[in-house]
Amino acid sequence: MSSTPAVTLDSVSDWLAQAVGEVCETMFSQVAVPVSGGPGPEASQVAGTLVTSIGFGGACDVDVAIHLPVALATRLASRVLEMPEAELDDAMVNDVGGEFGNMVVGAVKSRVTDLGVDCLMTLPKVVRGMDASVRGERKRLGFRVGPDFLWMDVGFGASR
């Protein structure tokens, strides 16, 4: 598989970090502060985590697993839907988690496409209480959003 030299795991990770900050700020009025690697999906955390798996493939392949604590996902859903947290159901929170993934990974896919690299985005898959793995060369990104951490596992170069 060949890829454009400008599209690497490091460049994709940098673009993802920038997109997380922009999406959190513009959509949720929250600040996402990068942290070194994040806490990672320990067994106790996975049970209370919403995971959005999404990516794009083609001339370069990217898999992303975004791990959001359910408390954070619920808070973000409350903000964007302008509803009290108590009125949200799991489907609403899951939809916002999926849309978060669409916005973040979509911003990176657009940037990659602008470099002339053909690729198509996958639909987000949202699950609760499960870990998700990514394929290919891997990197972990972490962010503090208010009192919570979210982390992303990024896979690059996986063949589909």
Image: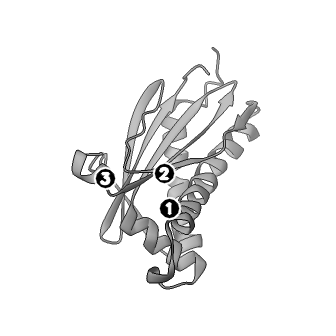
Question: What residue type is disc 3 on?
Answer: Ala
Residue wearing tag 1: 21
The x, y position of residue 31, in whole percent, is 44, 70
Colour pattern: one colour
Q: CA distance from mark 2 to mark 3?
A: 25 Å
The residue depicted at 61 percent of the width and 59 percent of the height is 99
Q: Which residue is mark 3?
A: 47
Q: Residue placed at 54% from the left, 23% from the top?
A: 158
Other residues around mark 1 within 10 Å, as few (<14) / some (14–19) / many (≥20): some
Residue 56 % position (x, y)? 64, 36
Residue 22 drawn above or below residue 132: below
Q: Residue at x 64, y 26 (%)?
A: 60
At mark 1, the secondary structure is helix
Provide residue 103's location: percent of width, then percent of height.
Answer: 63, 56
Secondary element at tag 2: helix
**Residue type pointed to by label 2:** Ala
- Please name whichever residue, 65 or 90, is drawn nearer the observer in this view of the structure: 90
Instruction: Classify the position of the N terminus by image quarter.
Output: top right
- Residue type, label 1: Gly
Q: Residue 33: x and y, percent?
A: 38, 62
Q: Quadrant of residue 55?
A: top right
- Please tell me the numbered disc located at residue 17: 2
Label 2–label 3 contact, CB within 8 A:
no
Whether residue 95 sits left or right of residue 40 in the image: it is right
Separation of residues labelled 3 and 1 (CA atoms): 25 Å
